[in-house]
């Protein structure tokens, strides 16, 4: 981590939590949100955004959605727009998660259009990139990441409305984490690509999160790396004690 970039710890709840469990989890996390040395964010499923906001909207806990459409309204059955997310009390939206890319066929161009629409609504776009195991084994990691960075990030992004998440697909939900050195190598590469695409100032100020089986036991070592500015947490964000332990690892 760098002293100049405020860390972000964001929880991606994915398709988990009914109302009672979700509200209890949000409340437990919100109770500590003012005490941690980072921006703490939760991204519940869309069904819970309004009620979570009503419960914890006055606290330091940030709220995010897990996806959005690139249009503001219209005949797009099943989708939600950046305006709706904003209306539900969100300040963040995760975009281009590998599960969206894989199961919903999202391309870099789709992700870029969504990010642009989200940023126009004053949401912070958490833009995800990451290679598959086959791509890593073939030695293509850096090429894949470069393409995703160039294709997914709007060219007029700012470091305030953009967060990047590096999530190696082979580390998501597998219990297999990238080593701190492996992760740092890619984060450093991402920062270099950000500099060439959007300039040195953008690259120096933009937070790059690691995601993929980040847990209380491995968080400190990952977060100690120079270019890792926080985490995007899946499984461990469903347990308030684990999620807060990761947030507390930021200052260690
Ligand atoms: P896990 O922490 O469960 O591996 O998930 C990571 C992730 O996909 C967060 O977006």
Image (spheres, helix red, strand yellow):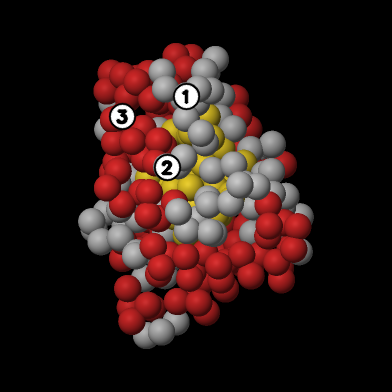
Q: Which residue is mark 3?
A: 240
113 horizontally vs 102: left or right:
right
Across and down, in percent, residue 55 comes to 44, 14
Whether the residue under disc 2 has CB within 8 Å of ligand 1: no
One can see residue 64 in this view: no
Camera-side residue of 150 and 120: 150
Q: Residues within 10 Å of mark 3 (few under 14, many from 20)?
A: some
**How many numbered circles are shown?**
3
- Determine the residue positioned at 68% across, 60% down: 203
Label 1 vs 3, first from the N-terminus: 1
Q: Which residue is mark 1?
A: 35
Considering the numbered disc 1 on the image, is that residue within a helix, a strand or a loop?
Answer: loop
Camera-side residue of 65 and 214: 214
Across and down, in percent, residue 171 comes to 31, 61
Q: Which residue is mark 2?
A: 252
Q: Residues within 10 Å of mark 1 (few under 14, many from 20)?
A: few
Of badges 2 and 3, the one in the foreground is 2
Q: Residues within 10 Å of mark 2 (few under 14, many from 20)?
A: few
- Vertically, is 89 above or below 110? above
- Vertically, is 99 above or below 146? above
- Determine the residue positioned at 74% across, 63% down: 200
* Spatial separation of the CA atoms under disc 2 and disc 3: 19 Å
In the rendered image, the quadrant that contains the C terminus is top left
* Spatial separation of the CA atoms under disc 2 and disc 1: 14 Å
Considering the numbered disc 2 on the image, is that residue within a helix, a strand or a loop?
Answer: loop
Considering the numbered disc 3 on the image, is that residue within a helix, a strand or a loop?
Answer: helix
- Determine the residue positioned at 65% across, 47% down: 4
């Amino acid at each position: 981590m760098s002293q100049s970039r405020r860390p972000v710890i964001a929880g991606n709840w994915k398709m988990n939590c009914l109302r009672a469990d979700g509200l209890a989890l949000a409340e437990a996390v919100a109770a500590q949100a003012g005490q941690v040395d980072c921006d703490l964010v939760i991204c519940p499923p869309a069904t819970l955004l309004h009620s979570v906001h009503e419960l914890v909207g006055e606290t330091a806990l940030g709220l995010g959605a897990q996806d959005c459409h690139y249009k503001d309204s219209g005949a797009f059955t099943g989708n939600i727009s950046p305006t709706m997310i904003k209306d539900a009390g969100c300040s963040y939206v995760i975009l281009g998660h590998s599960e969206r890319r894989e199961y919903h066929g999202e391309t870099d161009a789709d992700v870029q259009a969504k990010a642009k629409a989200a940023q126009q609504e004053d949401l912070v776009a958490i833009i995800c990139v990451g290679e598959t195991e086959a791509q890593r084994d073939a030695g293509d990691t850096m090429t894949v990441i470069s393409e995703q960075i160039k294709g997914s990030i709007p060219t007029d992004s700012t470091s305030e409305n953009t967060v990047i998440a590096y999530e190696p697909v082979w580390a998501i939900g597998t219990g297999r984490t990238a080593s701190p050195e492996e992760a740092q190598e890619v984060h450093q590469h991402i920062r270099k690509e950000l500099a060439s695409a959007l300039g040195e100032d953008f690259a120096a100020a933009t937070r790059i999160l690691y995601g993929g089986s980040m847990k209380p036991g491995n968080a400190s070592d990952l977060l100690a790396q120079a270019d890792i500015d926080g985490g995007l947490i899946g499984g461990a964000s469903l347990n308030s004690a684990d999620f807060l332990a990761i947030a507390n690892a930021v200052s260690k």
